[in-house]
Amino acid sequence: MRSLYADHVLERLQFMPEGTLQQRLLACMQAAIAEGIFPRATRLPATRDMARELSVSRNTVLNVYENLMSQGYVTARTGSGTWIAETLPEGCLNSPRSGDLNMPLVAKTAAISKRGASLLGHANASPYQWGAFVPGAPDVTQFPHKLFSQIQARLNREPDVDRLIYSSNGGCPHLRQALAEYLSVARSVHADADQIIITEGVHQAVDLVTRVLCDPGDPVWIEEPGYWGTRNLLRINGLKIQAMPVDEQGIRPEIASRSRAPKMIFVTPSHQYPLGVHLSLERRKQLLDLARKHKSWLVEDDYDSEFRFAGQPYPSLQGFETDAPVIYMGTFSKTLYPALRLGYLVVPKALAQPLRVAAAELYRGGHLLVQRALAEFIQKGHYMAHIRRMRKLYSQRRRFLVSLIERYLGQDFMPLVNHEAGLHLVMNLPVGCDDVAIAALALRRGVKVRPLSQYYMHPQERRGLLLGYACVDERQCQDAFGVLKACLIEAGILARPESRTVQI
Ligand SMILES: Cc1ncc(COP(=O)(O)O)c(C=O)c1O
């Protein structure tokens, strides 16, 4: 007999026509949990049973459960399966109000637009981005909070009116000036302060440029594999996404003879996300030529280039040629801390005014006091000093993690691209294995890793796990690595050791 859970999902699926089966299934279950139809603190059917009852593959259900877990809708209890969370974390869909539960199903599903359902169906952000081995999380405890709050407190004593009203001119002028100087030296970015627009991070920058420079249906290119955060923003803005493969030289651009040229090409040239390669000289030229020929914009996401631990830093694509058709984006989420919600756009002169006006219309900027304090933090040299300190720390942590992989798992698991850079690495796994199930298993044991296959739009054979090391000290790294190794054994990827205890 089918469970009530499966019955409800099957009924609800009919009203979710958009997206892949997995996306629709995820959206159905998110809504059912948020609305209280699946009661809090009850147990979900086992993945095998749910897959059978819904007549879908177990992998599909595993992926959905793993997504629900990473978003905080469900939790795993060792030995007793997957349970609906007792309280939904902030950011989940709203909990039900009394009375709502009796609304007919159609009305409840109709409350979310197709666009909204598609966004929720692809939602992928973890509810708590901290701990071993969350990819891309900097060590936020290392930020000089005392020093920064002293700067803020002093500036706050007599705030100008200018810092208390909406920001309408691309953000705090002092910060834009400080960034123009810093980016010129550190990233070879050529721009005046008036070409810089302060944003609430790369996410907002992507949203702004796509809304202002593209129309729904316009073709855009992204890297395959690539950052799903960008992909989701492009999807919600109605763009036609084409994924271009990445090889050891970076993105491999190809215009099929009958397809339309892309309006925008989203790239991470200095440190490809997530693989870590950098865009070769030849490809840089090829991309710039292509963009000029087709009047496309190259959108450069320079999210973590400050963290290159050895060899030459790779200069930005923006500064590679004069008047390059490049929109450059950077963020303080990696160099300082994500909750600061500050980033920047550097745009060609012709775009500066329209994008400033659009940003003010769409978002009504603010946080000018923090921006002013950050300008001083940069100009007095504290920013570079912090980056230098973190570079050393992250480099040591990276080396430690790599040494554990090499020693306890062996060469076959070593990072696919072993460049000394960034806040995460991609640990190799056997081709075709189920990296999603391994990540779900590790999450149930409290270790957060991301499966490489999640970063691809199209199915492929390559498998791996993204491991973030920047916020993980050696003790935590060693413990979490031991758990991960046990998961690999349980998943049949590693041979079971003779003795019953798994040691590293
Ligand atoms: C490739 C990439 N770009 C940008 C960001 C940061 O975005 P934001 O500045 O909005 O925090 C991330 C965060 O993980 C990322 O992985």
Image (spheres, helix red, strand yellow):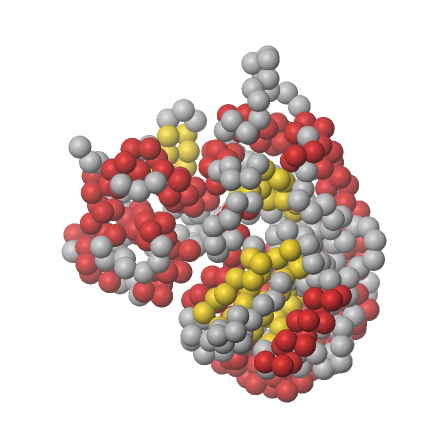
Q: Can residue 150 be seen in this view?
A: no
Q: Farthest residue in the front direction?
A: 257
- Image quarter (top left, top right, bottom left or bottom right) of the N terminus: top left
In this rendering, the answer to whether 234 lies above or below 421 is: below
The mark tally for this picture is: 0
- The quadrant holding residue 224 is bottom right
Query: Looking at the image, in which quadrant does ligand 1 appear?
Result: bottom right
Relative to 71, does residue 241 appear above or below in the rendering?
Answer: below
Judging depth in this view, the residue of 181 and 304 nearest the camera is 304
Q: In the displayed structure, does residue 16 sit left or right of residue 80?
A: left
Left or right, 443 with respect to 320, comes to left
Q: Looking at the image, which residue is at 58% across and 58% down?
A: 245
340 w.r.t. 31: above or below:
below
Q: Where is residue 136 in the image (x, y as percent from the top left)?
A: 62, 50
Report the residue at 26% width, 41% height from top: 54
The residue most toward the top is: 499
The quarter holding residue 252 reads: bottom right
Task: Give x and y (percent) for residue 121.
Answer: 38, 55
Residue sitting at x 31%, y 42%: 56
Residue 33 x, y percent position in the rendering: 31, 46
Visible residue check, residue 96: yes
Residue 111, how many percent across, how many down?
Answer: 26, 63
Please report the residue visible at 29 percent of the width from the left and 33 percent of the height from the top: 49
Task: From the viewer's perspective, tell me whether residue 157 is left or right of residue 380.
Answer: left
Q: Quadrant of the C terminus?
A: top right
The answer to which of 340 and 58 lies nearer the viewer is 58
Say whether residue 145 is left or right of residue 52.
Answer: right
